Image: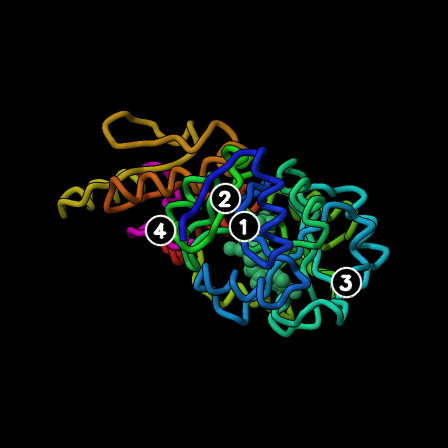
Amino acid sequence: METKIKGAEGIADAARLIKQGEVVAFATETVYGLGADAFNEQAVKKIFVAKGRPQDNPLIVHLSKVEDVGKVAVATEMALFLFSVFAPGPLTIVLKKKTQLPDIVSAGLDTVGIRIPKNKIARKLIEQAGTPIAAPSANTSMRLSPTTAQHVYDDLKGRIPLIIDGGPCEVGIESTVLDLSQQEPVILRPGTITQEMLSQFIPNIKCSSQAVDKVSSPGIKYKHYLPAVDCVLAKNFENAVAEFERAKSKNQKAVILGRAGFAKEKDVNFISLGDNMELVAKNLYRILREVERQFDYIIIEEFLEKEIESSVRNRLLKATQGIIV
Ligand code: TXA
Ligand code: MG
């Protein structure tokens, strides 16, 4: 199959493909998604096949407006309130699912994640397709999420008919996933809508890693975000340099990544991820995809457990499999 890349002018074609039961990749503000009509079981199956995604990992359903939540899920007052604050935007809320929604979307769970994206391309596509769109990130399973159309092409060329290019994603990491379907609200995946921001409305909101009763997000048990070469986190620049020298002595070509201010000397390969955490999140996957082609070893600044830092940290703990030097 030929994979075409089109800009916003391709949205009508993309909407037609979705209605016909095909899959289409498209820009959102977080990462690129691989979408299909959420009510078409055969179409949703194609997403799992194209990505090589395990069938027991549920998909997020994307809507263009909050009024549509009731088509797929049982809206709660808190969910509607949080959407009134944060939607459209990078927040996914897990709610009890309506039985009309095919089980394949939620991987057999009785809950479903709902997101109302902000990106214009995503919104227009959902509106024109006239149906909720189930979409995971548009990468091959276990690879980094794509933040440009080229990343999607690199992973999925020949497997999908069309990519709608909206330029580089503004946010750069996946949405915050907040589970409101159980007794205790819990953040299953941190994002740029942070624990601190949500705690204004849900005091003491926990992240699943902090929750006493670990709530399981099916995605958590899978290896995620694995770069092609070994990666470690470094507590500080001195440790990063020591690790760099160690790699060098083994003839490995290493690189250090971090915030602009992380590097304190010039004699090492250092690439800045950005001046602030918003930029770090935005650039992270693009830079990881670039450096894994050029280097054998990636050493990355360890970020802290606060605000957006903790969301980037969450992704990097997976990329490095938790190795900190
Ligand atoms: O920003 C995003 O959320 C992007 C864009 C395309 O919207 N989508 C995305 O989807 O990252 P995906 O499938 O790559 O990640 C969704 C995560 C998975 O870890 C999945 O297990 C979890 O959300 N999830 C989805 N539905 C769930 C549910 N009903 N209960 C618990 N976890 C759920
Ligand atoms: Mg994903």
Give the residue number, with chain letter if any, for mark 3: 73
Asked if marks 2 and 1 touch (Cβ < 8 Å), the reply is yes
Q: Earlier in the sequence, mark 2 or mark 1?
A: 1
* Local SS, label 1: strand
Q: Position of residue 57 (x, y in %)?
A: 55, 67
- In this rendering, the answer to whether 90 lies above or below 60 is above
Please tell me whether mark 4 or mark 3 is closer to you in this view. 3
Give the Cα separation between the discs numbered 1 and 4.
24 Å
Alpha-carbon neighbours of circle 3 within 10 Å: few (<14), some, or many (≥20)? many
Mark 4 packing: few (<14 Cα in 10 Å), some, or many (20+)? many
Report how far apart the C-alphas of labels 3 and 1 lie in the structure. Answer: 23 Å
Residue 242 appears in the picture as rendered? no
Q: Mark 2 to mark 3: distance in Å?
A: 28 Å
Q: Circle 4 is placed at which residue position?
A: 227
Check disc 2 and give the amino acid type. Ile
Q: Which residue is mark 2?
A: 163
**Mark 2 and mark 4: Cα distance apart in space:** 23 Å
Query: Residue at horizontal 39%, vertical 49%?
Result: 157
- Name the element at disc 3: loop
Q: Earlier in the sequence, mark 4 or mark 3?
A: 3
Of badges 1 and 4, the one in the foreground is: 1
Sort mark 1 into few (<14), some (14-19) or many (20+) by Cα contacts within 10 Å. Answer: many
Q: Is residue 304 left or right of residue 234?
A: right
Disc number placed over residue 2 in the picture, else none? none
